[in-house]
Image: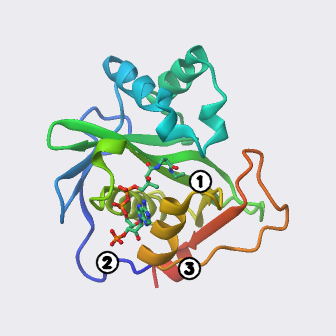
Amino acid sequence: MQPPSTSQLYKLVSHPGDPAFRLQSTSTDLILRLPTITEISILVDILENKENSKFDKSISEATSEELETIAWRWTTISRPLTHLNFLIWHHKNPIGIAGLGWIGACDANDGSRAGAAGVLIQPFARGKGHAYEALRMVVDYGLRELGLMEIRIASHSGNVPMKMLMERKLGLRPEVREDGVDQFGNDLLWIVRKETYIA
Ligand SMILES: CC(C)(COP(=O)(O)OP(=O)(O)OC[C@H]1O[C@@H](n2cnc3c(N)ncnc32)[C@H](O)[C@@H]1OP(=O)(O)O)[C@@H](O)C(=O)NCCC(=O)NCCS
């Protein structure tokens, strides 16, 4: 995955915790914003759509109430950050979700932190490069601005669009998983490390 050399992928406005906080793509019309409580129903609608969750057991097996709890959590931030999930806006339309569903300690236990990233685009907005743009913005923000040591992206090998996005478009090779699959049944794992991303 090639980082921007001189230019940034996005214009960064403010910081988490400020209502104005957003990442504005410099090459497309995408804006990533943290959802507000007035947007919980938008999040739940997106998460309830089986077309969006069929490869993600963390949401496909959740009840509506559980999805609402997840959405509520995404409208809050904690210090230190434990998650940062954005609503993806294209012009004035919410077209998906991208972000770091988990932020926590690296396995090395040396105080460094890592994140787990994901992306979801509504069916009507797919195939237009939005996932590519949103995911690389999230990865860049996590490594560059949050100082995470690595970003992990997991998926199921049956999820061909995600596999193609990661391997063909972003040029990442999956890691060999020692554990086989994670708790959500994902058998593919890609890791973007800060040391190789930001030379
Ligand atoms: C995976 C997903 C995010 C892709 O979203 P998208 O906006 O359609 O993807 P993009 O348009 O950015 O595609 C970028 C690249 O991915 C690959 N790709 C995307 N969809 C594909 C498909 N249906 N078949 C083959 N390759 C595909 C292509 O390489 C494409 O690049 P190209 O158009 O230059 O060939 C979308 O299908 C989705 O939201 N699925 C449900 C949620 C999910 O499974 N998320 C992944 C788990 S975190």
Snapshot colouring: rainbow
Per the image, the residue denoted by label 2 is: 4
- What is the CA distance from the residue labelled 1 to the residue labelled 3? 17 Å
Left or right relative to 180: residue 52:
left
Seen in the picture, residue 173 relative to 126 is either above or below; the reply is below
User: Quadrant of residue 80 in the image?
Assistant: top right
| Whole-percent x, y for residue 164 in the image | 49, 69
The answer to whether residue 50 shows anywhere in this view is yes
| Whole-percent x, y for residue 133 in the image | 32, 61
Local SS, label 1? strand
Q: Nearer the viewer, residue 181 or 116?
A: 181
Q: Residue at x 54, y 38 (%)?
A: 53
Per the image, the residue denoted by label 3 is: 195
| Whole-percent x, y for residue 7 in the image | 23, 76
Per the image, the residue denoted by label 1 is: 116
- Image quarter where the N terminus lies is bottom left
User: Quadrant of residue 41 in the image?
Assistant: top left
